[in-house]
Image: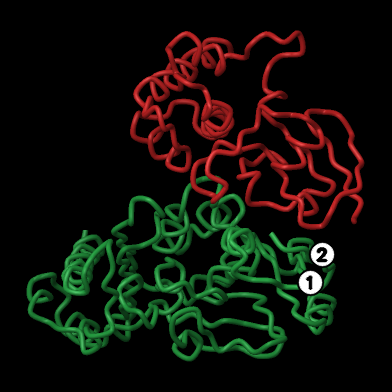
Amino acid sequence: MYDFQFSKAGSIEEAVNLKKLEDAEFLAGGQTLIPTLKQRMANPRHLISLLGINELKGVKTDGEKQIRIGATTTHEEVSREAVCFKGLSALAGKIGDPAVRNRGTIGGSIANNDPSACYPAAVLAADASIVTNLREITADDFFQGMFETALNENELITEIRFPIPFKANYQKFEQPASRFALVGVFLALFETGVRLAITGASANGVFRWTEGEKFLSENFVPGGIDELSFPNEDEFIDDLHGTGEYRCQLAKVLTSRAVISCSI
Amino acid sequence: MEQVSLIVNGLSISEELPENTLLVDFLRDTLRLTGTHVGCDTSQCGACNVQVNGKVVKACTILTLEADGAEIITIEGMSKKDGSLTIIQKAFQDNHGLQCGYCTPGMIMTAAELLRKNDNPSEFEIREYLEGNICRCTGYHNIVKSIQVAAKNLKINN
């Protein structure tokens, strides 16, 4: 690992000010950033730890409509505390392994936007918004391709606001070594219709499967999903873990399973 | 260089160290607590698992400075004060829960957390909780058995 300077921010304001230093990076749980530093794939001069900022922690519920999760809330905390949104708490409880869940954070996962990460699927399917020190960004605008987000240079995620769907389910087919999603499908059922987000499949990162949404909003049954197609199929990841065609089939099968889980 | 103060296995420690020191290197190289192992060094294998403020984390994936002020327990802090083995450790010994022993410290740290949360885990729950602990002797069968026996014995003891 290259050398760097380390600061622990005590407030959001302090963190954002420190970020103005040359080549500075925010450090949350570090479950992606630290391995990246060890491989010397990143070389920040300053690391700004966010874990001492109390305002960024915790799960809060506003009635039955919305749940707000602080950016540095760990996966383990979400899995235990987000009980009013079971699809989300179940997803958090299956990320990585117990030691990763004790340390990794929701804000870190979303800011990184790994194309195979679980959280982006929940954020996009549930039509959540990402609150930063500057503004509130809708999920549809936030994810902009592999490892790309709408975040600006000195912008820090403070909270994620999830509308609570009437029903929701996440289906993940794990890549057994990394435990990331080879393909993951998050289905959220609202009174206004179905939203479907797919992770792990596209080289452009998480995306909404609008054809699937339209089909299921009209008729919420698993039969017929197999006949649908993906307009972005040529962008599907094709690697040693699975071909694009395989991922395409998996996405359909997992969507069917999510429908069945929501129908029970 | 930065100053770090933490409590390791009940002892208060204050040291100056380079900012990029990983917790596992601090434990092994500075404190000479070599029971915490480095298996993969890529956050996969769990051989470096230690407890930080009551939670199991991978010591190869946390900066020592992030543990400033924390209470750390390593495998050396798991045995009783007189050096004799705790119920979980004894169960591993009695049930051939280790072959080469390299993964064992991490297995014990993870098993201890599981049994604190769930005093009667099913075989499936044990295997699921060990997802981040790799045994390259592939001795999982007896590791699972050891944890099942430990769960039973912990109950009898309570």
Residue occupying image coordinates x 77% and y 49%: B64
Q: In this view, does B138 lie above or below B1?
A: above
| Disc marking residue A46 | 1
Viewer-proximal residue among B59 and A224: B59
Viewer-proximal residue among B89 and B19: B19
Q: Work out which quarter of the rendered image holds the C terminus of chain A and state it.
A: bottom left
Chain B colour as displayed: red
Tell me which chain the residue with mark 1 is part of: A
Relative horizontal placement of residue B79, taking residue B109 as reference (left or right) = right
Of the numbered discs 2 and 1, the one sitting upstream in the chain is: 2
Relative horizontal placement of residue B108, taking residue B11 as reference (left or right) = left
Estimate the x, y position of residue A238 in percent, counting from the top left.
26, 73
Q: In this view, does B131 lie above or below B92?
A: below
Tell me which chain the residue with mark 2 is part of: A
Residue occupying image coordinates x 13% and y 72%: A221
Residue occupying image coordinates x 63% and y 58%: A38
Q: What residue type is labelled 1?
A: His
- Determine whether label 2 and label 1 are within 8 Å by CB: yes
Q: Which amino acid does label 2 sit on?
A: Phe
| Badge 2 element | strand
Q: In this view, does A229 lie above or below A66?
A: below
- For residue A6, which quarter of the picture? bottom right
Estimate the x, y position of residue B45 in percent, counting from the top left.
50, 42
Residue occupying image coordinates x 38% and y 20%: B142
Chain A colour as displayed: green
Q: Work out which quarter of the rendered image holds the N terminus of chain A and state it.
A: bottom right
